[in-house]
């Protein structure tokens, strides 16, 4: 079986060495680079299954690298950041990060997060569904979403979140429940604000007025539900 390649991007050689060692123990191949420009070049050469990306990088910082990546690829990205404020975390998620880890961290945690993100990046065990709600059509078999006949671009994680909600209309899901069902994670590992960011992205794609959503509504103090 061909090993999966993970790109590790950090300007500290010791961090790269430790992370790569633990990923190798889990059966991954790794390539390590030390700056943002080298990271973008490496993506073109090796087509990694996932990128572990430090935010504070020379040449081009991690946020800029992530933004450029999202112009042409949905490759999963885990950010490494020494910035623990909510604003910094949300910025990474808004730019398209799949997860983030705050430094200092355990290398075992990085390896566990890589496994979890890769499980989410492939179609999971949610049953295929076909949901129609007005001019919104969600096809679980083809994993396509159409709005008024137009195909809506939707990364795998957003699709899984949407169909999880839409296949059980009017059922309220808390952020912790959605983390477990869609991310295969928990609030012990991952900030529930991750769910909030992805809900916002979905609303921007399927709502007439994202600020006043009619399809994915908020039940204050409880969570979110899909209105059939």
Image: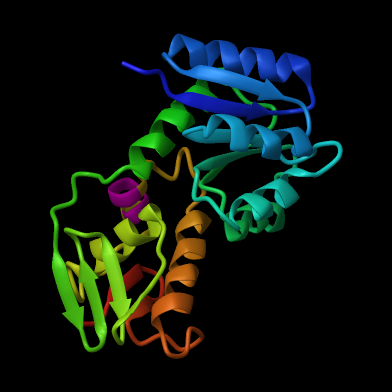
Picture residue at 43% right of the left edge, 90% below the top: 208
Query: Secondary structure of the magenta portion, mostly?
Result: helix
Expressed as whole percent of the image width and height from the top left, the position of residue 32 reads 66, 21
Q: Which quarter shows the C terminus?
A: bottom left
- Relative placement, left or right, of 22 versus 104 is left
Expressed as whole percent of the image width and height from the top left, the position of residue 160 reads 30, 57
Asked whether 220 or 9 is in front, the reply is 9
Picture residue at 47% right of the left edge, 30% below the top: 114
Q: Which residues are magenta?
A: 178-182
Above or below — where is 11 with respect to 87?
above
Above or below — where is 175 with respect to 204?
above
Picture residue at 53% right of the left edge, 13% below the top: 22
Picture residue at 42% right of the left edge, 71% below the top: 202
Above or below — where is 171 with respect to 132?
above
For residue 148, what is the image quadrant? bottom left
Q: How many marks?
A: 0
Expressed as whole percent of the image width and height from the top left, the position of residue 133 reads 21, 83
Expressed as whole percent of the image width and height from the top left, the position of residue 128 reads 14, 57
Q: Quick check: is 181 in the magenta stretch?
A: yes
- Relative placement, left or right, of 153 versus 173 is right
Hey, which residue is sitting farthest front in the picture? 45
- Relative placement, left or right, of 53 versus 58 is left
Q: Quick check: is 31 in the magenta stretch?
A: no
Q: Tell me how the rendering is colored.
A: rainbow
Q: Which quarter shows the N terminus?
A: top left
Asked whether 48 or 116 is in front, the reply is 48
Hey, which residue is sitting farthest right in the picture? 59
For residue 7, what is the image quadrant? top right
């Amino acid at each position: 079986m061909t090993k999966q390649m993970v790109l590790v991007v950090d300007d500290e050689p010791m961090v790269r060495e430790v992370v790569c060692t633990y990923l190798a123990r889990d059966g991954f191949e790794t390539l390590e680079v030390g700056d943002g420009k080298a990271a973008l070049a490496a993506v073109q050469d090796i087509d990694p299954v996932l990128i572990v990306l430090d935010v504070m990088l020379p040449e081009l910082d991690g946020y800029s690298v992530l933004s450029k990546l999202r112009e042409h690829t949905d490759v999963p990205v885990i950010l490494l950041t020494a910035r623990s404020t909510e604003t910094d975390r949300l910025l990474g998620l808004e730019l398209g990060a799949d997860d983030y880890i705050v430094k200092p961290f355990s290398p075992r945690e990085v390896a566990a997060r890589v496994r979890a993100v890769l499980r989410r990046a492939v179609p999971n065990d949610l049953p295929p569904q076909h949901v129609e709600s007005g001019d919104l059509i969600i096809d679980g078999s083809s994993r396509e979403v159409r709005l008024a006949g137009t195909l809506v671009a939707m990364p795998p994680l957003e699709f899984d979140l949407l169909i999880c909600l839409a296949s059980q209309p009017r059922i309220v899901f808390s952020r912790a429940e959605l983390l477990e069902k869609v991310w295969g994670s928990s609030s012990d590992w991952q900030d529930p604000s991750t769910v909030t960011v992805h809900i916002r992205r979905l609303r921007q794609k399927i709502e007439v007025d994202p600020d006043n959503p009619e399809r994915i509504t908020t039940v204050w103090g409880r969570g979110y539900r899909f209105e059939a």
